[in-house]
Image (cartoon, helix red, strand yellow):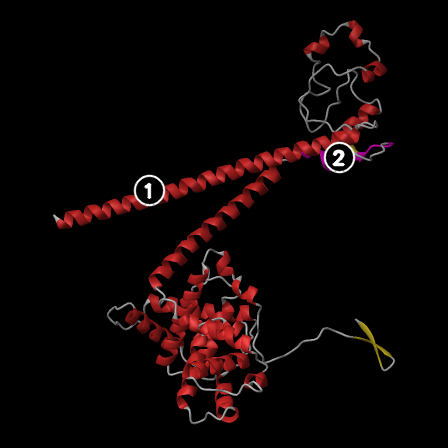
Amino acid sequence: MAVFVDGQHKTDYGRIILSCDNILHDPDRVTATPSRGDGISADDERDIRIVGCELIQTTGVLLQLPQVAMATAQILFHRFYLVKSMVIHNYEHLAMAAIFLAAKVEEHPRRVRDIINCFHHYKQHKEKKPVVPLDFTGSLYVKMKNDIIKAERRLLKELGFCVHVKYPHKIIIIVLALILEQKQNTELIQMAWNFMNDSLKTDVFLRYTPDQIGCACIWLAARMKKVVLPESPPWYKLLDCSQETCSEISDTIMSLYTIPRPDTTKLDRALNAAKEAYELKKSFNEKTKKDLKDVTASYSPLPDHVGGKETPKEGSPLGVPVREGAKRKENGDGHRNGRRKHSPGRKRYSPASPRRKHDRYRSKKHRSRSLSDSDTSPRRHKHRSRRRVSVSSHDGSSSDIEAAEARKKRHEDKKRLQDQKRIQEKIRQLEKSKERKKDRIGDHSRERKAHKVK
């Protein structure tokens, strides 16, 4: 945009705003995630977020990381799944990548080997399996290491390398100790701190500022401990917060204590079902696009040899191209009986070859027909040549073109419906074969169990 500065003509380019504030989103944007679009319910998505944050918190404790690093990892975890689907990207790999990246951001780096070892130990303990050390020379360790590195790169790419996070932990201490004069009330401070750590499992950091979250944690802890805080003027006005905002954040935090504990087996089953549906839908869309592309490429309203040999018809009000054969006929250069002359590309017969039988025994009357009569007489012989594109100069030529386009459209629609029905039938057959296979496997397992019992 051109502007005038001090009487001089200068160009005002776009501006880049750098800020250390957290990235906030509307509530509609937070609820309409890609995971919902891929078949994950709201409750399953909430439980997966809780399980991923618990994995980050426990692994961070085993790695002896500060709480700031674990908070950063959990917020990055929430930000990633705001733009990507849990069906496509494994939440366990992303949780390990988030804590690996957050440890480096907060200047407490840890080795990938240590993160994998802690995660493997925690998973065995959670599933109540015997704790067996991970073999660092095996294929499992190499695969997990590559998955973590790839997930870290994907995390940085989707977030645009914006990994800065602000926390409300300092705000809690400063407000309670200096402003509210509750420095000696350690129980109130500890409860507000606990609410703060639990809020990391929710999506409040995607919708509210750190100051608002800190005020909500203090407000909720004061109500739980029945501590009276100043209301005239309200103390939370100092941090640009309102009582409605504190109430909304408090309700979100308290909802964590009312829901049942997430079942990882159920969540894995829901993720696998959504992933199968996603893969089936993806293959169906690719097959449909390919079939439609083949149908469109194979159908053409005009012959293949028309392109490159069309010449505009002189004097035509529509300017529609006409083939050279039709132009030769109009100029009087065609065959005497109304047929086209021999084309070099088509070996029907040669002028040097013997005359055809029906030409040899033609009556004298037909041989002596003039060229003018032959041009005005209708065709009497069927030709194997392709359809001509004839355009007359009367008023009905435009309607012929519209009719041809309508026929083409009906043909394409009919082919498209046939292809879609064929693909849907194949998908139904595939699903039936999978069901039969599952039934056979179930029958075999029942037979083996019955045999063992006998």
Disc number for residue 436: 1
The residue that appears at 72% across and 19% down in the rendered structure is 352
Few, some or many residues within 10 Å of mark 1 (<14, 14–19, 20+): few
Image: magenta residue range: 300-315
Q: Tell me which label, 2 or 1, sits earlier in the chain.
A: 2
Is residue 203 at all visible to an observer of this figure? yes
Q: How many marks?
A: 2
Residue 310, image quadrant = top right
Q: Are marks 2 and 1 in contact (CB under 8 Å)?
A: no
Q: Tag 2, which secondary structure?
A: loop
Residue 121 falls in image quadrant: bottom left
Quarter containing the N terminus: bottom right
- State the image coordinates of residue 267 (x, y, percent, origin top left): 38, 61
Judge whether residue 323 can be spotted in this image.
no
Give the residue type that dot 1 points to: Arg
Residue at which label 2 appears: 309
- 398 relative to 50 in the view: left or right: right
Write down the quadrant of residue 376 in the picture: top right
Q: Residue 167 magenta-drawn?
A: no
In-front residue for pair 232/424: 232
Q: Is residue 301 magenta?
A: yes
Query: Mark 2 is on which residue type?
Result: Lys
Residue drawn where x is 72% and y is 6% of the image: 361
The residue depicted at 74 percent of the width and 7 percent of the height is 362
Comparing 7 with 224, the one in front is 224
